Image: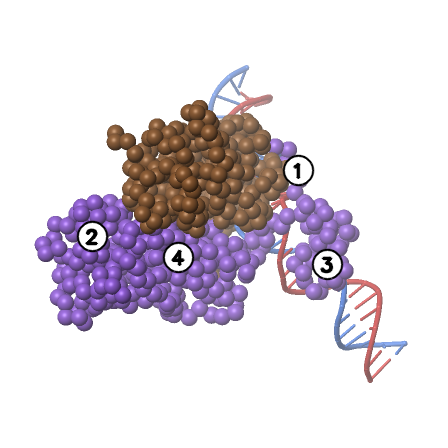
Chain colours: A brown, B purple, C red, D blue
Amino acid sequence: METKKEVTIYDIAQKLALSSSTVSRGLQGNPTINLKTRERIQEAARELGYRHNTFASSLRKQKTNTIGVIIHELSSSFITSVLAGIEKVTSETGYDILIAHSSESFEKEAANALNLFHKRVDGLIASLSLQTKGLDHFKQFEEKGIPVVYFDRVEEKSDSVKVVIDNYRSGYQATQHLIDQGCERIVLVTANLQRNVYDQRHKGYKDALFDNGIPFNSKYVLIKDLSEQCGIEAALQIIKMRPMPDGAFFTNDFSAAVCMKTLKEHGLRIPEDIAIVGFNNDTIGKIIEPQLTTINYPGSEMGEVAARHLTNHLRGLSTLDNTSTIVIQSDLIIRKSSLKKAT
Amino acid sequence: METKKEVTIYDIAQKLALSSSTVSRGLQGNPTINLKTRERIQEAARELGYRHNTFASSLRKQKTNTIGVIIHELSSSFITSVLAGIEKVTSETGYDILIAHSSESFEKEAANALNLFHKRVDGLIASLSLQTKGLDHFKQFEEKGIPVVYFDRVEEKSDSVKVVIDNYRSGYQATQHLIDQGCERIVLVTANLQRNVYDQRHKGYKDALFDNGIPFNSKYVLIKDLSEQCGIEAALQIIKMRPMPDGAFFTNDFSAAVCMKTLKEHGLRIPEDIAIVGFNNDTIGKIIEPQLTTINYPGSEMGEVAARHLTNHLRGLSTLDNTSTIVIQSDLIIRKSSLKKAT
DNA sequence: TTTGTTTGCGTAACCGATTGCCTTGATGGA
DNA sequence: TCCATCAAGGCAATCGGTTACGCAAACAAA
């Protein structure tokens, strides 16, 4: 408990018979200070156990050197890799990051946004929750000129920088693949179509059907929350359908896995009776049997691109074109869960 | 970019013809300020769009009202629930949290610790990485009187507050369960025994064997990193053993799942040929087939307990007894992967 | 020698909130 | 009437860096 007094630049200044401003500059590596002096300062700092006071600095500079990250969940390999990508860039550029997750709740997201706002982050990277409607809770950032970059889960209509994959194309591709495998009655299990990613995948699904002359049947579209329960429910619904669907496209690997398991428990064979495609390329897809065909989502790259844009802007290296959308490449990974035809 | 001037307490003071000190006290709800005045202040603040300046406040108060959380990974349901538990308590008590993850790397952990130290967190909650040896990188906190609470992955020999489960007992219990199911040659797949959790589980495993008169065979102990690769390797090693093991205890669900899958691919039946028990009660255990017997780990409670202890101490409501260890209840969850005998 | 230019560093005014100590007017009791 | 007490606020120093501006010395050019 006996907190020793903190060492300040004044202590260093006194020790070296310099002024505090010289010490401050020296610590920042300012070249107007003689190199020798700078080295003496750095060493004295180390010797005395000086630690930079972020508050004093932020207070004076009106900058925090911190980027806020708002995500819709924490525990998926996709998000983990996005975070890794962001961290890679921010650690290179010397920014700190503050992570907040909304657990898919709009209220929590808004609360997180407010909190980060009060913490005065210099910029924000965000992926919207499932329930989020509108971007009013981010307006405060805009008003203060704090740049925001959205990724993955975005608001399409908004004027803002977005880093996404081509969800339409991926949805199309997944569906086309099922059709190529001979499927004719393809179920789509997805979440709230308000959210761009699900909306686009849905459109891709629809168009692929249309282009192949397969009628769209709204009974085949199951809107759920992509939870464990959802996978079970979807399976039960599928089983009851007459005629039985012969293919299913899930917009998330986890629910696909749960559903697959439930279907198997009810005696269905995969992919023979029903072919399955997921989305996200989660680790789980390689563990279940049969292994899951899915859409690979380059999380790390998304994170890097988003962070790079933001930090470049913050450092004045480039300007954010406010309406730019960056599309990252995504691919279909074919595994056994969808292979009706031998390859 | 046209950053409007920030509103400060001086602006509020001017508007209401009060002094800044009165405004400051009013915003804090200090009762020496007349209730009416306080209300006028609060309203003016809202009206002007005032936001509290954390830096100025922290600078002056020498407190950040922030707790650092260092964890060894991000993406497991266990950690997610720990974080949820911590968040529950900290949001109740008005603390902010800063999350940093080490990805099981000692260097990153030390870097994170240093970073949080520089950010001047008021307290720290930490779970050590697999590679961590010693607690020297946390000494700086101790020296400044900043309290640290460790959870799950701890350094047993150290004088510090720890929140853990009874790993010895869980290891014993898991092994005993396999023995009860008729297993006689039980493999243990685990990680670096330096880390307390793995060491204790290993001891429990050994003692359970001993108490049942089963000789301990060091060839049956596979030390790995609990990655995907590890699960595959373990399976291949198990298959080659003569006589083949009839039971396996993994100290992590993920590697158990991967191993199970690999074993099945090689034609082994689970649990008939080999019974399997995991650890952690990850979601994955319910999805694979057969479902995985495992040790349930009450993450949320651990987080809550750790956070409660820390905040209570910080708020002066209690003193941390520096050598106290809090043990949280854990349980064996029996599923099909280990049930050789019908129940 | 005189008049620029650099180089290298010091002065002092911030940044915004907090808080120990004071002041003022009101109230009460003796 | 006089002093003590109290309620309600104000004054000003403080937290630790940052930075616009200033100033002296040294050196070069004229």
| SS assignment at label 2 | loop
Q: CA distance from mark 4 to mark 3?
A: 40 Å
Residue tagged 2: B269
- Which one is in front, B4 or A330? A330
Q: Residue at x 46, y 59 (%)?
A: B85
Residues at marks 2 and 3 on the same chain? yes
Kind of residue sitting beneath label 3: Arg
Label whose residue precedes the other's in the sequence (2 or 3):
3
The residue that mark 4 highlights is B126
Residue B303 in the figure: left or right of residue B129: right
- The residue located at (52%, 54%) in the rendering is B96
Q: Chain of mark 1?
A: B
Foreground: disc 2 or disc 1 = 2
Residue denoted by label 1: B4
Say what secondary structure mark 3 lies in. Answer: helix
Q: Nearer the viewer, residue A143 or B237?
A: B237
Are tags 3 and 1 found on a single chain?
yes
Residue B334 position, x and y percent, is: 30, 62
Q: Secondary structure at mark 1?
A: loop
